[in-house]
Amino acid sequence: MKCRSVTKLSVSMVILLIFGASIAPVIGAANEKKALSALRKNLNDDFDQKILGLMKQARLPSLSLGLIKNNSLVLYRGFGKYNLLTGKQPTNETIYAIGSISKSITATALMQLYEQGLFNLDEDVSIRLGFSLRNPKYPDVPITYRMLLAHQSSLFEQNIESLSSLIDKIGIIRTVKMLINFPFIPKILKEPYPMIKELLIPGGRIYMPELWMDYPPGAEANYSNLGYVILGYLVELISNQSIEEYCLKSIFNPLNMKDTRFHPKEVDRRRLAALYEDWRIIRPIQLPQFDLLYFSPAGGIRSSVEDLSHFLIAHMNGGVYNGVRILNESTVNLMHTIQYPNSSYTPINTSFEMKFGLGWFYTTDENNDTWGGHTGGGPGCAAFMRVRVTDNKGFIAYYNRTGFNESERKAVIFIIQAIKEKLNEM
């Protein structure tokens, strides 16, 4: 695939050099400009056809993609249909579930409060929580903000990307129990974020001891959604606002992220991408638009490519987007600094290592390029928000289906590789 792409580019460049050198003085600047424009279109057409072919192999309903350079969204492409019933093609304002990219937004909110001197990164979070959050196997080791932000708290991660994988991990009976209890326990107990204590503290109504690892906090990296649920709650305790209100006032409005919200009912449903899960049938099953409720700080946010590009540009530009500063440059640098250099995490069924900053992680790809940012996934959705360290170019990509077989998964990997190759041309 890569060789074919390079060949097409080389042939096009040879044609341009030959005819540009010999004919341009004759046909004039206006026609030369047209020729260059046509070349760029052909290059884009080649890219589009490659993506469409890979999407067909991966059976993706839609793909929404933006490339970012020099603090701008320089290219947008929308492929397929974001809702198979309505047949609508995505635009840069189509709204997708962004999964765990939500963690970068939650971390940014918390670090804004850190800048105000309201807590110390190495402070015990139990002080704010009002109860002792400890790994029961290591009750004398405090859990800090830095540990939670950098996935170093010794909390377990179930590594769930779909409903079927959740059932595979913990069984159908426990899955049903979790799905029934999680949305309603907060309402029954009438207490903010009660599931933290109920899940993690011995004696809790749905206490799950397997959510704690067998090593002390700070010893090893282990990706944890629950850690970011706790961080979302801490934003609320420190700011005296709901996290939704806080982020709207301090992140979304300042960055003109008009279509970014924590709950699906708060966005324009006409522009909301459907969620699809493939259970080996003729066409994917459309899932309901799930609301993660109190778990949204870890993975429930919806956003468009346009909106998220504003947030990513702010991080790529030292905390500033379009003249508006949401973080000090020193804070952004701190978030983008690996906190525990000797500690890394390798997700199940993958071969790449993740090293964590604060709401930000790094991986190295097959070309030995290091990429920062975050990715996200859940039932019926996947999202990428990545920045290449060497040249500060980035991309955002969303698609709306999960449940791949092995060949389909490889096609998705090739899509991401093609996006990176396209970014090289920008």
Image (cartoon, helix red, strand yellow):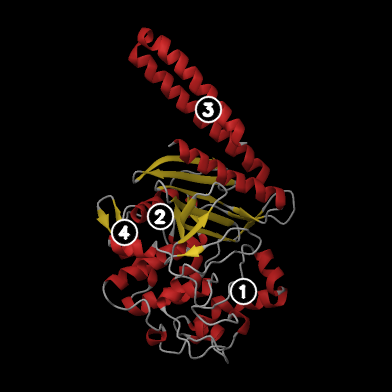
Q: Earlier in the sequence, mark 1 or mark 2?
A: 1
Q: Dot 2 corresponds to which residue?
A: 259
- Left or right placement of residue 92 versus residue 178 in this view: left
Q: CA distance from mark 4 to mark 3?
A: 42 Å
Q: Position of residue 118 (x, y in %)?
A: 29, 78
Instruction: Give the quarter of the image for residue 249.
Output: bottom left
Residues at marks 4 and 2, CA–CA distance in whole angstroms: 10 Å
Give the secondary structure at mark 4. Answer: loop
Instruction: Specify which label sits upstream in the sequence, 3 or 2.
Output: 3
Secondary structure beneath label 1 = helix
**Can residue 390 be seen at all in this image of the molecule?**
yes
Quickly name the residue at label 4: 253
Of mark 4 and mark 3, the one earlier in the sequence is 3
Alpha carbon separation for disc pair 1 and 4: 33 Å
Nearer mark to the viewer, of 3 and 1: 3
* Type of the residue with mark 4: Asn
Give the residue pinned by disc 3. 9
Question: Which residue is labeled 1 in the image?
Answer: 179
Three-letter amino acid code at disc 3?
Leu
Residue occupying the far front of the picture: 342
Q: Residues within 10 Å of mark 2 (few under 14, many from 20)?
A: many
Q: Position of residue 169 (x, y in %)?
A: 69, 71
Image location of residue 280, percent across then percent down: 74, 54
The x and y percentages for residue 307 are 39, 52
In which image quadrant can residue 157 be found?
bottom right
